[in-house]
Every structure is written in C-alpha cells, then in structure tokens.
Image (cartoon, helix red, strand yellow):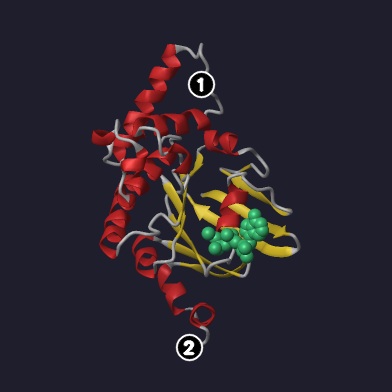
C-alpha cells in the first residue's frame, strides 16, 4: 500500500519553477530516498508534503486521504513527521525540554499556566521515550548547545519521533558528519525505524549511504522526476549517470 502519494506537484518562486510536475509514491514499510543535485527541488517537495508550502498545482495524499495544504501540525497528527533539521531555536534548552516542546508543537497546543498537569506528565514521558530511543536519555538534562553534531542529529530524530509518526521525512540527516559517523548514523536509523515500524522518506547526497539505506530511489533533476526504481536500476540508469556526471560516464 502507498502510504504517501504526491501527484503532479508544481511550485514556483518568483517565476522560477522549483517543482514542475513531480509525482511520488512511498510504499508502507519502505526506506525511500529522494536524490538529486543541489537545487533539484528536494526540500521544496518535502515542504509541500508537510504543509510548510502550498503547491501551485497537484495533490498530496497520506494513507489515501488528501492532505494538500493542511497545516504541518495537523499533518503530523495523522502520522507524518519531518525532522527540524536545525535545532537552532532550541539551543538554550535542555534536550528534554526541546523534545517536549516538539511534542507539544505536534499536538498543536501551547503550554499555558493552567495546562493540566496530567498533560504535562504525558508530554515529558513521551519526550523521555523518544530520547531513550535515540540513545540520549543519559543526556536529557544537558543543553542543546553543548551537543556535538552527531548527537544533534540524533536529537533531531528524537524531535521527529516524538510525533509517533508512521512516515518520517529526514532531509539530509547525514550532512556534516564524518564518513565513520555517517555509517553509524545509517545503521542507527535503519535499526530504529525497523524496530518502530516507521516508513522513511529521506534526501541524501552521500551515494554510499543512499545505497546502504534505501530500498527505493527517486531521482529529481531540475524539478522533475528523472528516474525511479530500486537502487540497482538507478545505478544502471544511463540518464541518471549523464545528469550527475555531466556525460562523463
Ligand atoms: P534541493 O533541496 O534539492 O537542493 P530546493 O528545493 O531547496 O532544492 O530548491 C529548489 C530550487 O528552488 C532552488 O533553485 C532554490 O533556489 C529555489 N527555492 C527554494 N525555496 C525558495 C524560496 N523560498 N524562494 C525562492 N527560491 C526558492
Ligand atoms: Mg535541500
């Protein structure tokens, strides 16, 4: 079953067409990579899927239900979460506070003076659960600003996981990591999501990591789908080689 379907998505910025008729199907249980050179439209497509951006044309379905134009927290409540990518607004918080706040955000609530304690307790419990899932429970009281980049990436995953998603979107989860750290992160993501039964749609530049993690790949190029298939098909695809290697292959 397709968990996510994007149908013929168009989106332009001041006349520049970032997405020009992109369609995508993500099957339940799959790890699906969206690859393509810088500026191909990957992040824009993620933003359209999660409701951060409205498409000019096209529709998005999650579990068969149309969600085009829904606000992000409402999409998240259905089970589609996206990583924050930058923990920037959270740097002065503790890890527990940052994950708890993410949870509250997904619930579409804000903390107020008279927020029932029962609700606060539930939020903190979920936040602790998410931190333990990414192996950061021991660091719950540390400040986000103190974390090395590898741990920040894990925090990022925890902040998405706390939405209890069926589908997780990760935009360049390995960016900035060393080769050894990337390998570790690939193993970590695979293990965690298999265990939790979470479907993954991710973007990544590191070909080795993509081939290690993905069981399906969609190639975007200049706002259009250039190819789609299992990793072996994509590796053999002449058009993909040409687009990526400038005809050198
Ligand atoms: P990718 O994630 O594949 O690198 P993006 O989706 O970020 O690509 O960008 C696709 C194209 O759309 C780029 O040319 C980028 O400059 C442009 N773009 C993306 N977001 C905006 C925006 N908010 N305003 C103007 N142009 C944008
Ligand atoms: Mg991007």
Which quadrant contains ligand 1? bottom right
For the residue pair 163 and 180, the one nearer the viewer reads as: 180
Q: Is residue 7 visible?
A: no
Residue at the spot x=49%, y=28% of the render? 104
Q: Is residue 152 left or right of residue 49?
A: left
Does 130 sit above or below residue 202?
Answer: above
Q: Is residue 95 left or right of residue 85?
A: left
- Whether residue 12 appears in this view of the structure is yes
Reading the chain from its start, which is encountered first: label 1 or label 2?
A: 1
- Number of labelled discs? 2
Q: Is residue 24 left or right of residue 182?
A: right
CB of mark 2 near ligand 1 (< 8 Å): no
Q: Residue 80: where, in percent of width, then height? A: 51, 41
In the picture as drawn, the residue positioned furthest to the bottom comes out as: 248
Image quarter for residue 40?
bottom right
Which of the 4 quarters of the picture holds residue 143?
Answer: top left
Vertical order, 207 against 151 (above or below): below
Left/right placement of residue 16 relative to residue 38 reads right
Q: What x and y, as percent, mark residue 152? A: 35, 46
Q: Nearer the viewer, residue 164 or 142?
A: 142
For label 1, the crowd category at 10 Å Cα-Cα, with few meaning under 14, some 14 to 19 and many 20 or more, is few
Residue 168 numbered mark, or none: none
Q: Position of residue 136 (x, y in %)?
A: 28, 39
User: Could you say whether the residue bearing mark 2 is in a helix, strand or loop?
Assistant: loop
**Considering depth in this image, is 212 or 221 the residue closer to the camera?**
221
The extreme right residue here reads 15
Query: Residue sitting at 31 percent across and 44 percent down?
Result: 147
Q: Which label number is shown at residue 248?
A: 2
Which residue: 71% across, 65% down? 16
Badge 2: residue crowd in 10 Å (few <14, some 14–19, many ≥20): few
Q: Indicate which disc residue 111 carries.
A: 1
* Mark-to-mark CA distance, 1 and 2: 56 Å
């Amino acid at each position: 079953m397709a968990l996510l379907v994007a149908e013929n998505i168009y989106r332009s910025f001041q006349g520049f067409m970032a997405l020009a008729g992109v369609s995508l199907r993500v099957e339940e249980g799959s790890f699906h990579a969206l690859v393509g050179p810088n500026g191909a439209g990957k992040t824009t497509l993620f933003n359209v899927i999660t409701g951060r951006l409205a498409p000019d044309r096209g529709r998005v379905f999650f579990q068969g239900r149309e969600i085009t134009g829904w606000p992000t927290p409402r999409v998240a409540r259905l089970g589609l979460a996206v990583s924050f990518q930058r923990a920037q607004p959270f740097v002065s918080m503790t890890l527990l506070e940052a994950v708890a706040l993410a949870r509250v955000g997904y619930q579409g609530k804000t903390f107020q003076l008279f927020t029932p304690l029962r609700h606060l307790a539930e939020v903190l419990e979920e936040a602790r659960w998410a931190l333990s899932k990414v192996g950061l429970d021991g660091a719950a009281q540390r400040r986000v600003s103190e974390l090395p980049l590898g741990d920040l990436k894990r925090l990022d995953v925890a902040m998405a996981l706390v939405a209890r998603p069926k589908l997780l979107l990760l935009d360049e989860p390995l960016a900035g990591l060393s080769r050894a750290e990337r390998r570790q992160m690939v193993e970590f993501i695979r293990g965690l999501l298999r265990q939790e039964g979470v479907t993954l749609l991710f973007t990544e530049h590191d070909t080795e990591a993509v081939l290690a993690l993905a069981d399906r790949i969609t190639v975007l190029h200049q706002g259009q789908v250039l190819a789609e298939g299992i990793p072996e098909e994509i590796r053999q695809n002449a058009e993909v080689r040409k687009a990526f290697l400038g005809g050198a292959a």
